[in-house]
Structures are given as C-alpha cells and as structure tokens.
Image: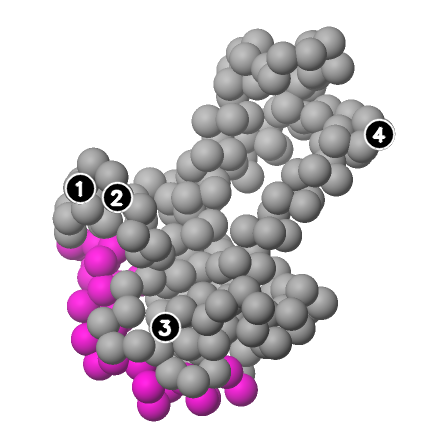
Amino acid sequence: NARIGDTKCVAMLHSLLPVTVLSMAVGNAPRNVAMRSAKSVSPVMGLESMPGGYALGGTFDPLGFAEKGDLIWLREAEIKHGRLSMLAVVGYIANDLGIHFPGPQYAGVSSLAAHDVMVKSGNMSLLLAAVVVCEVLHSCLIFPQMSKGWEAGYDPGNFGLDPFKMTNDRQRTAELKNGRLAMLAFSGLVTQAALTGGGFPYTG
C-alpha cells in the first residue's frame, strides 16, 4: 500500500477523479491506464468469474465496458458507489422521517432542501472536507496499483474491515446486487421527492 506521504498522493489532492457507476458494469477507466493495467490484471478476475452475475443471463455488459476499461478498477468503483448509495437511501428516508442531527439548525429541514440549507450555513464545507480525505486515502491505495499493476489476488472493495467475519461469496453477491438496486433507487427517490414536494413516502 502506498503511504500518504508519497509524492504521488500529494499530486492526487489536485486531481481527484470523480467516478460514476451506472448499473452492472459502469464507469469508464481512462484509456491509457487501462492499457497499462491490462497486462498485470490477474486472469482470475475475468468478467465471467467475478461475483455479481445473474443466473438467467450470466453477465450483463451491453456496452462492453469490461473490454474497454480496467475490469478491477470498474468493480472497485461499482462496489464503492453501491455502498454509498445504500447509505444514502437509508439516510435520505431517515431524515424525512424526523431523525436529524441534534441542534435547531437541522430541525424541520427536508432531505430535498438539505443541500441548499447546509451550503448556506457553511456545514457543507465539513462534509466536503471529509469526502476529500476519504477520496485521497482511497486514491493512495488504488492509483499506484493501476499504474504499476494490480497485486496478485487483489480483492476489489476489500479493506480488511470485517469485525464480525461475515464475508463469504453469498454476502459479496448480495452486496453487489443491493448496491446496484440502491444506485437506481436513490435516483428515483430524489426525483420523486422533487416532483411531489412532500416527505416520505413521497406521494404528494
């Protein structure tokens, strides 16, 4: 693992790459990085052998992202955004059900209006700072491997955080599929909230 003090990580502070994951095989790795990484990717990480396939149709990659980009990088991005979306769905609904941070400035603020309210109060800067720190730490782990080649047996999304020893193939597949559903669900959730202007269950 690269250290935070590495000069490459300092440069990353000025060039964090935003990643967007849409459905089963999403995002798009930079073409030059993909070409450098293709030779070093473990053959075990083929699309057909990766967790998250579907019994009825096997792999689902109609746009061919797996052939154009770095497959391990794509899976890393999918897992990260799936996890964030699962947390986002729960947090969005919880806030609209009245579960807020303590303090009068948070009382009565809907999830839909929270962004503008937090920007106006200055609290959004704290969230942005936390996101930047997380992205830098993650980048220091991922980008050196993308440039030099993935370590043998690298497990996308595995940061060694499993205190209850729950990790198994079934749980990994469940996480992927629920993360994919959450990415779509959060988009629909925000859209429905904006259209109806009401709180949960967003029926107007």
4 or 2: mark nearer the eye: 2
**Residue 153: horizontal and vertical position, in percent?**
23, 72
Mark 4 closeness class: few <14, some 14–19, many ≥20 residues within 10 Å: few
Q: Nearer the viewer, mark 1 or mark 4?
A: 1
Sequence-wise, which precedes: disc 4 or disc 2? 4
Q: Earlier in the sequence, mark 3 or mark 4?
A: 3
Nearer-N-terminus badge (1/4) = 4
Above or below residue 124? Residue 139 is below
88 up-or-down from 136: above or below: above
Kindly identify the amino acid type of the residue bearing the numbered disc 3: Leu
- Give the residue at mark 3: 71
Q: Secondary structure at mark 4?
A: helix
Disc 3 + disc 2, Cβ < 8 Å: no
For the N terminus, the quadrant is bottom left
Q: Amino acid at mark 2?
A: Asp
Task: Residue type at mark 1: give it.
Answer: Lys
What residue sits right under mark 2 in the picture? 162
At 31% across and 81% down in the image, what residue appears? 41
Residue segment shown in magenta = 32-60
The image shows residue 52, relative to residue 150, as above or below, that is above
Please count the marks in the image.
Answer: 4
C-alpha span from label 1 to label 2: 5 Å
Which residue sits furthest front? 5
Q: Indicate which disc residue 165 carries.
A: 1
Q: Which mark is residue 120?
A: 4
Name which quarter of the figure residue 26 lies in. bottom left
Residue 67 located left or right of residue 47: right
Q: Secondary structure at mark 2?
A: loop
Q: Residue 127 in magenta?
A: no
Secondary structure beneath dot 1 equals loop
Q: Earlier in the sequence, mark 3 or mark 2?
A: 3
Q: Position of residue 77 (x, y in %)?
A: 45, 59
